[in-house]
Image (cartoon, rainbow, N blue to C red):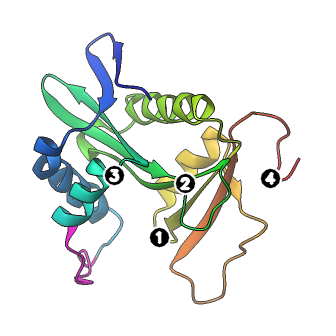
Amino acid sequence: MISERVKPGRIIRTAVPAEVESIVTLHARARATYYPDGIPDDGTDWHGAWRSAVERPDGHVLCVVEQGRIIALASFRTPEGGAADMVKLFQFHVDPDHWRRGVGTALHAACVEEWKADGKRTAVLDVHVDNRRAQAFYARQGWIPDPQNPPAEDDHHLDLRFCVTGEGTRAGE
């Protein structure tokens, strides 16, 4: 597991429970950018969800810290019922004030490094259909539409797939 990764002016490391409030705040700021009418209240207890993600022994939450402040985060683990060599990226957020500065790319690289170390071959995620910025980011990182989970007409999310091992350019190769 990656516990710390130092880059000039930034650290990528595992999040700790004391940081849940900062994580929830960053998560809300990032999500607000792709909900033009405001974030829908779906009843999710985000404090509880993030605390659970940070404390899960079978999961990982990496964060990017600059000047003592969390500016990006990623949460991932093997999905329920998923193959042992699969990982699901559940959350990936960069503070909007830090977009287009290489923060997301560095965090994604740290995730891939962790996935390789953990023996993962395939990563999956779902992204909101209105979040075109995130879709473009994932495409630049090598994610493709998941051929095993094509979207239904009324889906609010798109399923993407990433070959962790770098073997082949399409899922299943």
Q: Which residue is mark 4?
A: 171
Is label 1 or label 4 in front? 4
| Residue depicted at 85% across the width and 39% down the height | 168
- Was residue 119 drawn as part of the magenta stretch in this picture? no
Q: Which residue is mark 2?
A: 78
Q: Please report the bounds of the magenta region as a residue range.
A: 37-46
Residue type for callout 1:
Asp
How many numbered dots are placed on residues in this image? 4
| Residue depicted at 23% across the width and 40% down the height | 97
- Asked if 139 appears above or below 81 in the picture, the reply is above
Q: Which residue is mark 3?
A: 56
Q: How far apart in space, not on screen, are marks 1 and 2 (Cα)?
A: 26 Å
Is label 4 or label 2 in front? 2
- Was residue 43 drawn as part of the magenta stretch in this picture? yes
Q: How far apart in space, not on screen, are marks 4 and 2 (Cα)?
A: 17 Å
**Considering depth in this image, is 163 or 33 the residue closer to the camera?**
163
Along the horizontal axis of the image, is 148 left or right of 29? right
Along the horizontal axis of the image, is 144 left or right of 54? right
Where in the figure is residue 137, as x and y percent of width and height? Answer: 53, 45
Where in the figure is residue 3, as x and y percent of width and height? Answer: 35, 25
First in sequence: mark 3 vs mark 2: 3
Task: Give residue 62's mark.
Answer: none
Helix, strand or loop for disc 4: loop
Q: How far apart in space, not on screen, are marks 3 and 2 (Cα)?
A: 12 Å
